[in-house]
Amino acid sequence: MRRAAPQDAPLLLSLIDALADYEQLPRPDAAARERLLHDGFGAAPRFQAYFAELEGRTVGYALTLETYSSFLAKPTLWLEDFFVLPEERRRGVGRAIFRFLAEEALRRGCIRLEWAVLTWNQSAIDFYEQTAARRITDWFVYRLTDDQLRDLAESPID
């Protein structure tokens, strides 16, 4: 495992494309790609990216950022992206990434490692449950997207 550096930008973008393809989502457009590179490698990075290497090849990546628990008064390491190339799975790469992330969370003083998984991704769910991760069932995830954010920000306060 190693942290991505600015010269790794094309590699990071190619792995993000591979994840988008796997999840059958659109790849980031040119503007999003530019933002990704700025936000990952600019003066004030918003996320960290890590690469998993096997036999001299990059075979997976993880993208993380910190959130914060006001009740515990400690940070949480949020795992935004976790991907191993399909042809490299079942070789211990995912487990190595998770172990690295656990070590990284502890090194940073984080109290938790959290992430979301698509409901259809049973292979990922099975993997996570093998790591002793616990599915949170008493919380719902909500999201406001770009247009919804604008509508809410511009709405009158009654």
Image (tube, grey):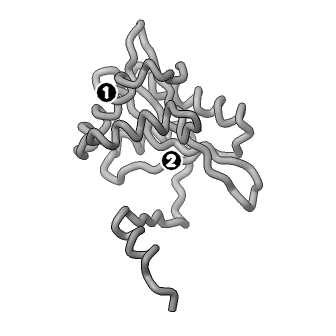
Where does residue 112 sit, x and y in percent of width and height? 65, 46
Q: Circle 1: is it few (<14), some (14-19), or many (20+) Cα within 10 Å?
A: few
Q: Residue at x 38, y 12 (%)?
A: 57
Amino acid under disc 2: Trp
Which is nearer the eye, 46 or 24? 46
Where does residue 127 sit, x and y in percent of width and height? 44, 37
Q: In this view, does 16 lie to the left or right of 142?
A: left
Residue corresponding to mark 2 = 115
Amino acid under disc 1: Ser
Q: Circle 2: is it few (<14), some (14-19), or many (20+) Cα within 10 Å?
A: few
Task: Kindly report which numbered mark, 2 or 1, lies closer to the viewer in this rendering.
Answer: 1
Q: Is residue 84 left or right of residue 25?
A: right
Q: In which quarter of the image is residue 45?
A: top right
Q: Which residue lies furthest to the top in this view?
A: 56
Q: In which quarter of the image is residue 18?
A: top left
Q: Which of marks 2 and 1 is nearer the N terminus?
A: 1
Considering the numbered disc 2 on the image, is that residue within a helix, a strand or a loop?
Answer: strand
Q: Which residue lies furthest to the right in this view?
A: 73
Q: Which residue is drawn at 71% across and 36% down?
A: 108
Where does residue 39 sit, x and y in percent of width and height? 48, 39
In the image, is residue 127 above or below residue 85? below
Residue corresponding to mark 1 = 14
In the image, is residue 83 above or below residue 10? below
Q: Count the marks.
A: 2
Q: In this view, does 132 lie to the left or right of 124?
A: right
Q: Which residue is drawn at 37% across and 62% down?
A: 146
Q: How far apart are marks 2 and 1 (CA)?
A: 22 Å
